[in-house]
Image (tube, rainbow, N blue to C red):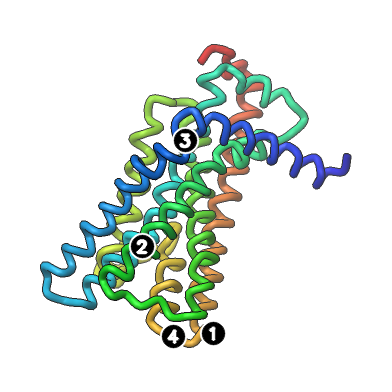
């Protein structure tokens, strides 16, 4: 089997394993009646905050930002998902296998990527008509692609952070919460990025969602499609950078574990 085919095969098996684990937590019925209703209410809440401000522009700004934020939020569940193998005691076997551990972990938590994508689009296309946010046709067909890009960029960050918390698994929820709260606070979801001091603004540009969300805002606002390309390229670059860091993190973990025997079979 060629290297590429082998990598894709490992990714597919890891993804299948992750979805089987996820199916223990949610069926489609409990997902719709539990998680989806929760995130739907969350987007409605922020849209109503905009209405309290007496500004239709604020309603649409908050609605769109918080709907797209769900793609990043869902993808960051990968932080916790990466710890499942160590908790199950199978991490040493992954480190000893011929495949790179990062390949397994990228596939392992793809359920989080799909969850975030469906949550975001499900909230946006349901809540937008309720608050008269127009999604121009056929430009709206590009929204799922941009949401997927935001989710993938956040997923790369989540995989990187998951690699960091593998040595301190008790911190996984804290790290994930700090990550998504930071993105929510400074990534342009509720407050424009340029509102913050310049150092904070620079940091926001290195985070997932910031550029992808701006591209979606421009798309919905009717900007020429060509003007979206710089933000799309920047979002892609941010995601690629976080994925490269994830690769380095997992390789370092594997090499360190082989060297000092610090990766145990116990959960």
Residue sitting at the far top: 266
- Number of residues whose C-alpha sits closer than 10 Å to that of mark 1, classed few (under 14), some (14–19) or many (20 or more): few
Residue placed at 60% from the left, 50% from the top? 244
Are the residues tagged 1 and 3 within 8 Å (C-beta)? no
Percent position of residue 225, x then y: 52, 83
Residue placed at 67% from the left, 26% from the top? 94
The residue that disc 4 covers is: 223
The residue that disc 3 covers is: 27
Closer mark to the observer between disc 4 and disc 2: 2
Q: Quadrant of the N terminus?
A: top right
Q: Earlier in the sequence, mark 1 or mark 3?
A: 3
Closer mark to the observer between disc 3 and disc 4: 3
Please tell me whether mark 4 sits on a helix, a strand or a loop: loop
> Viewed as shown, does residue 24 lie left or right of 56?
right
Please state which of residues 140 and 235 is positioned toward the viewer in this rendering: 140
User: Mark 3 and mark 2: span between their CA atoms?
Assistant: 21 Å
Above or below residue 265? Residue 213 is below
Above or below residue 32? Residue 94 is above
């Amino acid at each position: 089997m060629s290297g590429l085919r082998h990598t894709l095969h490992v990714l597919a098996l890891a993804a299948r394993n992750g979805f089987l684990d996820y199916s223990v937590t949610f069926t489609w019925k409990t997902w719709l009646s539990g998680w989806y209703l929760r995130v739907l209410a969350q987007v409605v809440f922020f849209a109503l905050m905009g209405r309290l401000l007496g500004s239709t522009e604020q309603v649409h700004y908050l609605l769109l930002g918080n709907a797209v934020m769900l793609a990043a939020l869902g993808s960051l569940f990968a932080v916790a998902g990466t710890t499942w193998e160590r908790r199950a005691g199978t991490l040493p076997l992954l480190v000893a296998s011929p495949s790179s551990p990062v390949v397994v972990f990228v596939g392992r938590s793809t359920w989080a990527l799909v969850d975030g994508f469906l949550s975001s689009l499900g909230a946006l296309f349901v809540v937008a008509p309720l608050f008269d946010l127009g999604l121009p046709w056929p430009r709206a067909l590009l929204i799922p692609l941009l949401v997927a890009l935001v989710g993938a960029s956040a997923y790369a960050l989540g995989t990187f952070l998951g690699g960091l918390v593998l040595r301190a698994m008790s911190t996984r929820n804290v790290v994930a919460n700090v990550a998504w709260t930071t993105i929510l606070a400074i990534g342009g979801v509720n407050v424009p990025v340029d509102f913050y001091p310049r150092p904070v603004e620079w940091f926001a540009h290195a985070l997932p969602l910031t550029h992808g969300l701006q591209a979606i805002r421009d798309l919905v606002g009717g900007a020429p499609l060509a003007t979206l390309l710089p933000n799309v390229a920047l979002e892609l670059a941010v995601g690629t950078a976080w994925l490269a860091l994830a690769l380095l993190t997992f390789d370092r973990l594997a090499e360190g574990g082989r060297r000092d025997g610090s990766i145990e079979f116990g959960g």
